[in-house]
Amino acid sequence: GENVEQHPSTLSVQEGDSAVIKCTYSDSASNYFPWYKQELGKRPQLIIDIRSNVGEKKDQRIAVTLNKTAKHFSLHITETQPEDSAVYFCAASDSNYQLIWGAGTKLIIKP
Amino acid sequence: GAVVSQHPSWVICKSGTSVKIECRSLDFQATTMFWYRQFPKQSLMLMATSNEGSKATYEQGVEKDKFLINHASLTLSTLTVTSAHPEDSSFYICSARNAGLPYEQYFGPGTRLTVT
């Protein structure tokens, strides 16, 4: 079955700098890759997603890149702000449309 | 659109009792609902997948007789934690999927269960 690995587990960046979180997946049949942001005690919120027929997608300060050959995808946040502090999860959708989750990255934005 | 509610938001119960958690899709028909459990500082762990009108499919290691799931309608799924123990204390989150949009999952706000 699908396995998703996410790195780093914790990322601390200075406010205004960029943050990059990386995930790898094992099942080449996976074709949907969402990123979720979860604040403490709250539900995961979808922030961006990408399908396998696209290599890159951008939404304001957030972008996701996908390398199907290498089976990895990354989340890029530019011009980070204090409200970006949260835990970010990547996921990959298997053939049953179930989401296989990464372990999460705690992003800390230092003022 | 795509709002999922969950009730209760938090519950405290005594060891040995049962607790029911409801998950509702408010503005769409949820053909599939997922139940997750999340321990502090950990990722979401899928417990089971339920399709409306059929039995839930449980993930390996999840006791189906302990975590009873019912998905009787296209807008409601329930998770009942039977004979709860302190180790069942966790954050339980449901998500719902519309058959017309199979990829997107919409999450409920979660239920914090504490078993004393």
Image: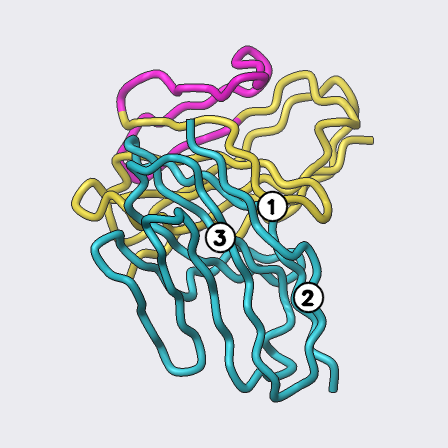
Q: Quadrant of residue A95?
A: top left
Q: Quadrant of residue A7?
A: bottom right
Q: Nearer the viewer, residue B102 or B109?
A: B102
Under tag 3, what secondary structure?
A: strand
Q: Amino acid at mark 3?
A: Cys
- How crowded pointer 3 is (Cα within 10 Å; few <14, some 14-19, many 20+) is rated as many
- The answer to which of B20 and A34 lies nearer the viewer is A34
* Residue at the spot 37% in from the left edge and 35% down from the top edge: A27
First reached walking from the N terminus: tag 1 or tag 3: 3
The span shown in magenta is B53-79
Crowding at mark 2 (Cα within 10 Å: few <14, some 14-19, many 20+): some
Judge whether residue B72 is colored magenta.
yes
Residue type at tag 1: Ala
Of the image marks 3 and 2, the number of the one nearer the N terminus: 2
Of labels 1 and 2, earlier in sequence is: 2
Viewer-side residue, A56 vs B38: A56
Judging by the rendered image, the residue that carries numbered circle 1 is A103
Palette colour of chain B: yellow
**For numbered disc 1, what is the local secondary structure?**
loop
How far from the left and from the top, in percent, is residue A16?
Answer: 61, 88
The percent coordinates of residue A26 (x first, y second) are: 43, 36
From mark 1 to mark 3, how far is it between C-alphas? 8 Å
- The residue wearing badge 2 is A11
Rendered residue at 38%/51% (across/down)? B106
Q: Which residue is mark 3?
A: A90
Q: Colour of chain A?
A: cyan
Residue found 40% across the figure and 28% down from its top: B49
Q: Chain of mark 2?
A: A
Residue farthest to the front, as pictured: A69
Quadrant location of the N terminus of chain B in the rendered image: bottom left
Mark 1 Cα shell of 10 Å, populated few (<14), some (14-19), many (≥20)? many
Q: What's the residue at 42%, 56% (across, down)?
A: A73
